[in-house]
Image (tube, rainbow, N blue to C red):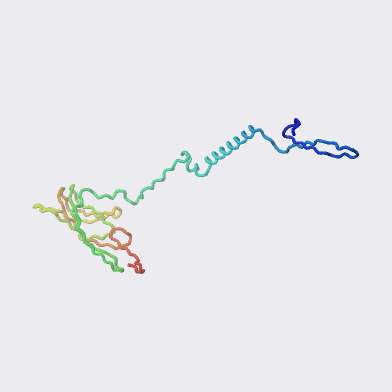
Amino acid sequence: MSNGYDGKERFAMSSESGTGSTSGSSSIKFKESKGVFLSRAAAVLLALIAVACVIGVGVIVAYTKPGCDDASGAGSAAGEPRPEAEAEPSASRPTDVRLPRGVVPLHYNVELRPNLDPTVFKFDGWVEILIECRQPTDNVTMHVNKLTTRNGALRSADAYADDDTPTIASVSRDDAKQFLIYELRGKLHAGRRYWIRMDFEGDLEDDLVGLYRSKYTTSTGEVR
């Protein structure tokens, strides 16, 4: 029942018997509702404020998380990859180990004799290299690594009436470039071909370079 009162208030009617009264008297008691009441507009405004706070916190965290910027990256845009430092070439390692182009190899004849005795592990042999002279030169330079060479000799590969093939005057090495250099008593002629021959020997190592040794274990556990 309303009786014209505000909808937020409730009332109850109770009958109380008064002392000394022959007829019950009726009284009305009002009970007020407890709590906070908001209008719909105020509720929508509070919801928008909460969403804005969440978005603002997310933006702040994204720009302040570790790794976006630090002292070592000052002056660079956030997120840009920093260039890696380039390794400087070692001062003791040559940067150019190419052979001179005065002579070029055309053909190789090689004989290898490995000694697989575990107490020795060495090899020896000989090589003949057919070379062609492209420019007059008084030396022949080859690549040699971890080899002992001996008995070097040079002869003409073509028959000429005026065969003036120079002999080897001296032998030198450049270990940093792995060069073996034969200095000649005279010059090779451009356009002519020559055979250069030498004997060599070296150790059969397990460094996986050149002629090397290796071992494996069979299914029965035998090492070979």
Residue located 34% across and 65% down the image: 216
Relative to 53, 153 lies left or right = left
Residue 2: quadrant of the picture: top right
Residue 22, horizontal then vertical, whole percent: 89, 38
Q: Is residue 88 left or right of residue 204?
A: right
Outermost residue to the top = 4
Residue depicted at 86% across the width and 38% down the height: 24
Please name whichever residue, 145 or 19, is drawn nearer the observer in this view of the structure: 19
* Quadrant of the image containing the N terminus: top right
Query: To which quarter of the image does residue 179 belong?
Result: bottom left
Q: Find residue 198 and report its horizontal and vertical position in percent.
A: 20, 59
Counting the numbered discs, the total is 0
Q: Is residue 203 above or below residue 140?
A: below
Location of residue 110 in the rendering, given as x and y in whole percent from the top left corner:
21, 59
Q: Which of these two is toward me, 50 or 167?
A: 50
**Image quarter of the C terminus:** bottom left
On the picture, is 178 further left or further right than 136? right
Residue positioned most to the front: 23
Check the image and name the residue furthest to the left. Answer: 161
* Residue found 35% across the figure and 67% down from its top: 219
Residue 166 in the figure: left or right of residue 89? left
Name the one closer to the observer, 206 or 180.
Answer: 206
